[in-house]
Amino acid sequence: VNVEIHHSHVGDVLAFDDLLRPQTSTANAQQMSLSNGESYPTPIVGGGATAMRLETYNALPAKDQSLWNHYSADLELSFNLWMCADGIDVLGTSLARVVVDPLVLSTQEKTNLPGPTTARLVSAWMKGHGDDEYASATLRAVANFAAADYQSKNILENGSRPRDHAMSEHRVLPEKARDLKNILVRIAEEAQQSPTFPSGLGKKCRPFSWYVENVHPELKIYQVEENDEGSDSNKLNMSNGKTLPSKPLDDQRMAIISRAS
């Protein structure tokens, strides 16, 4: 039973973008054809609360108590079920629905995912299996977005782009993005030393590249090459990056998938 803040519809597919922000799309014909259109797989769960059998919850390999809001917990639950178990099916009808007072649990609170929380999730689920480039690209995307937001706020407040004596105006944004990414990388590394951090997932669960290929193929995570500072190609235009491919399933990765199954 999934407790929703807003009414969902049959055919809704809950997923996320390269910043791990939530997205809702419509199931395609192949997805809806499963179980005669009554059930279809979706990348993530969504809602204020999710009910499951106690033995299923106890068997989850990751239960990070430092994920402070509902959306980050939804992501962790989804990764648990897809990468370490049998996945998620969404039913066309619910056995129960609970209306949650938005003053108690707002939509913004449910879906907000701060940079440090993103770094923690990335460190847990996108590392290992030779998939570290997914972690790096995701943290870069988060840093780019935060840098652009920072510059936009400065433009609104000051009426012009922020300037630095050591940098030309067109280099302010890339420099800010690099600083923010370095901070996120440090947070991701420090998270692994936390007593509540879920460790050992690389030996228990499927690779993140498998998840991208088999569960969320619409996800576009871009790898951007580092260029000389100040060059036009160094501007933060993610559309110029290349989409990260899934990894070939060698014997070691096949063994991980076998254990996760």
Image (tube, helix red, strand yellow):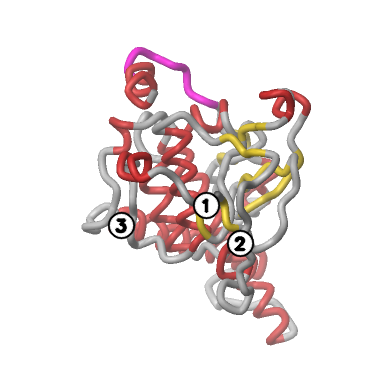
Mark 1 lies on a secondary structure that is helix
Badge 3 is on which residue? 191
Is residue 116 placed above or below 139 in the rendered structure? below
Is residue 250 placed above or below 40 in the rendered structure? above
- Badge 2 amino acid: Val
Mark sitting on residue 173 = none
Please tell me in which quadrant of the rendered image residue 101 appears.
bottom right
Other residues around mark 2 within 10 Å, as few (<14) / some (14–19) / many (≥20): few
Q: Nearer the viewer, residue 55 or 247?
A: 55
Residue drawn at point x = 56 percent, y = 76 percent: 104
Is residue 81 placed above or below 261 in the rendered structure? below
Does the magenta portion include 198?
no
Q: Earlier in the sequence, mark 2 or mark 3?
A: 2
Q: Nearer the viewer, mark 2 or mark 1?
A: 2
Residue 168 visible from this viewpoint: no
Q: Disc 2 versus disc 1: distance between alpha carbons? A: 38 Å
From the viewer's perspective, is 251 left or right of 26? Answer: left
Badge 1 is on which residue? 140
Q: Which stretch appears magenta?
A: 246-252
Mark sitting on residue 98 = 2
- Residue 81, image x and y in percent? 45, 37
